[in-house]
Image (cartoon, grey):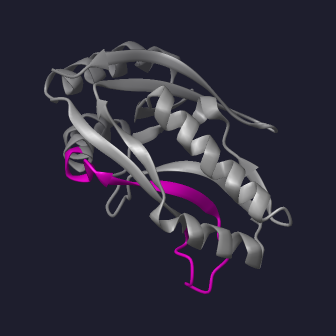
């Protein structure tokens, strides 16, 4: 099973992310993008990768411990961008919206989680940028690059990060399907 840790997003943020997607789609109909579904919007904490079913109880226990050592924190979602960075001369691969408040708390959570999972072969994520993926670019266009530049200052909203979720990702030709494998409240 393919697993990752995440912070789930409030309804208002989900709606705001869909609005950004709609504006990008309208402004750049010539771009080919596999858009993330509303059900797949989340803030990744740590990608665990392939784990066996028999590891699941231990992983769930680790998630409970990590959550019990983490306080709620506020996140603000804003600013459309892409990987690689627009203007780098390389084609865009991933469209995203970033975290403009709470990034330090998010990084502390990542650093708290990593030592639990590195013995299972999970790599450390140096330089990871907190973001919510809007879509995967198959074929970019100049209109997409321009539309993304307009979204650079877009404010989506804010919420409290109150829990750690363990999510299973099943890859299909239509995109990833997510199944929640547990949710642990922060203290």
Image quarter of residue 112:
top left
Between residue 114 and residue 132, name the one nearer to us: 132
Q: Is residue 141 above or below residue 50?
A: below
Q: Is residue 46 visible?
A: no
Q: Which residues are magenta?
A: 83-105
Tally of numbered tags = 0
User: Measuring 35% from the left and 22% from the top, which residue is drawn there?
Assistant: 59
Between residue 154 and residue 92, name the one nearer to us: 154
User: Measuring 54% from the left and 56% from the top, which residue is drawn there?
Assistant: 96
For the N terminus, the quadrant is top right
- Left or right, 167 with reference to 94: left
Residue 38 location in percent, x, y?
Answer: 63, 33
For the C terminus, the quadrant is top left
Residue 13 within the segment the image draws in magenta: no
- Left or right, 161 with reference to 144: left
User: Measuring 47% from the left and 16% from the top, which residue is drawn there?
Assistant: 181
User: Which residue occupies the extreme right position in the image?
Assistant: 30
Residue 171 location in percent, x, y?
Answer: 70, 35
Q: Is residue 24 visible?
A: yes
Residue 78 location in percent, x, y?
Answer: 43, 54
User: Measuring 54% from the left and 26% from the top, which residue is drawn there?
Assistant: 168
Residue 136 location in percent, x, y?
Answer: 68, 55
Residue 101 within the segment the image draws in magenta: yes
């Amino acid at each position: 099973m393919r697993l990752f840790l995440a912070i789930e997003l409030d309804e208002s943020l989900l709606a705001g992310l869909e609005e950004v997607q709609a504006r990008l789609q309208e402004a750049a109909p010539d771009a080919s993008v596999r858009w993330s579904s509303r059900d797949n919007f989340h803030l990744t904490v740590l990608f665990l990768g392939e784990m066996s079913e028999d590891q699941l109880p231990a992983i769930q226990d680790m998630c409970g411990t990590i959550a019990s050592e983490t306080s709620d924190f506020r996140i603000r979602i804003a600013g459309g961008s892409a990987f690689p960075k627009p203007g780098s001369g390389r084609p865009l691969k991933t469209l995203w919206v970033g975290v403009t408040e709470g990034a330090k708390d998010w990084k502390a959570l990542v650093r708290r989680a990593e030592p639990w999972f590195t013995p299972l072969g999970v790599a450390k994520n140096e330089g990871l940028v907190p973001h919510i993926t809007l879509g995967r670019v198959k074929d970019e266009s100049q209109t997409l690059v321009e539309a993304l530049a307009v979204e650079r200052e877009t404010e989506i909203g804010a919420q409290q990060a109150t829990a750690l979720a363990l999510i299973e990702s099943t890859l299909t030709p239509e995109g990833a399907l997510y199944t929640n494998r547990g949710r642990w409240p922060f203290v």
